[in-house]
Image: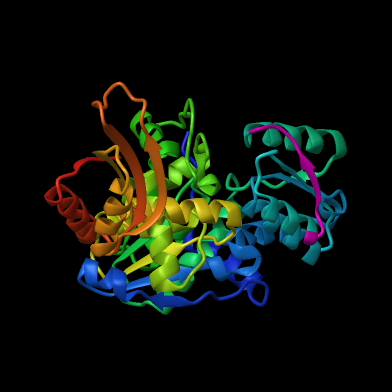
Amino acid sequence: MSVPLVTGADVAAAAELLAGVVRRTPLEHSRGLADRVGGPVWLKCENLQRTGSFKIRGAYTRIARLTDEERARGVVAASAGNHAQGVALAARLLGAEATVYMPESAPLPKVAATQAYGARVEMFGESLAEPLLAAAEHAERTGAVFIHPFDHPDVIAGQGTVGLEVLEQCPDVATVLVCAGGGGLVSGVAAAVRERRPDVRVVAVQAEQAAALPGSLAAGRPVALESMSTMADGIAVPRPTDLTLAHVQGLVDEVRTVSEEDLSRALLFCLERAKLVVEPAGVAAVAAVLADPRAFEPPLVAVVSGGNIDPVLLLKVVQHGMAAAGRYLSLRLRIPDRPGSLAALLAELAGVGANVLEVEHERTSTRLGIGEVEVFVVFETRGPTHAGEVIGAMRDAGYAVTSE
């Protein structure tokens, strides 16, 4: 059975509905990415949208089109964070009572923001699967309308307004990269772009450890992942739906995946070069560009879909990103077990500009010879070239070096 697709006209109608409600987020040029790609690269900054992500677009469109009687019964949703905030704010603006089920693992800032927008939050289960079931049961029990994060034409049409803005802000765009979890955003963007500019290439980007689209496309039907493990919780969705898969099959040119290291590097890039705070899911499109910059025809627009990141996770991801970028280096070195040996090693590291962050001593390993000590050193470098220079200098100084 064929699934009706959202049209460009549907997206245009949603844009009229959202006028004065959502922000027309800026399109910022990235010289750092442009130099790699060999042409203009722009960032569509939905991390600066109301509630910190694009989700308000779809949530408001869906709730605004409910009847007065439906809105009076209230709305219910399940989300790890961004959809929760979008539903909470949209419901408040439209005078509906909102209940949101969130997993126990949801970042505290997202929980607090959802409550601040006026929703009643229920913490339930370890993954998003349990809150989804709880929200469905709540809807059945109370008559509240379930607002799915992506499986509804109104939600897709609302998200697609991002694509309309991209076409208006960058009329000569050749490629649009969009992160994808359940597929609502990329479905809407593709619907908007395909009708007005069929020559524009639309690329969906998933975290490789939560990539349900490739297997579902190969099977020709939604196929659930057995497990997921990614820092990009906003796009950690185990399966698309018939609706979103049909849009990806019919409108999206390519699906790419990015590694956790790619995501870390991209997040660090956005902080350092673009001066943007972005969550791991929101940076997936940028990660794809950094991982394979020559794969995309410029002018290129990468949708930065959200900026709601837990500060604790931000610290971990920045550290991970610096390690992935060669800015942190861990070495094991063997030195003589005698006074002054450690001081001499640290002096050698200082001499080549390595900033030591951590040092551990080990004397009892069976792999060590008599009179040897193994030292584990973590230090900061200026990048991969400098890291290589440090390793070379240590070996030239006579140390047995092992990289971690």
Q: Nearest the camera: 325 or 180? A: 325
Q: Is residue 363 visible?
A: yes
Image check: 178 left or right of 346? right
Tell me where residue 75 appears, x and y as whole percent. 78, 49
Q: Nearest the camera: 102 or 190? A: 102
Tell me where residue 362 appears, x and y as whole percent. 37, 33
Q: Residue 298: which quarter of the image?
A: bottom left
Residue 310, relative to residue 28: is it above or below?
above
User: How many numbered marks does the figure carry?
Assistant: 0
Q: Nearest the camera: 97 or 345? A: 345
The quadrant of the picture occupied by the C terminus is top left
Taking the spot 33% from the left edge, 32% from the top edge, the residue there is: 218
Taking the spot 59% from the left edge, 67% from the top edge, the residue there is: 13
Q: Which residues are magenta?
A: 116-126
Tell me where residue 58 appears, x and y as whole percent. 61, 58
Taking the spot 58% from the left edge, 62% from the top edge, the residue there is: 53
- State the scheme by which the image is colored: rainbow
Q: Residue 49: which quarter of the image?
A: bottom right
Q: Is residue 295 visible?
A: no
Tell me where residue 44 appears, x and y as whole percent. 45, 69
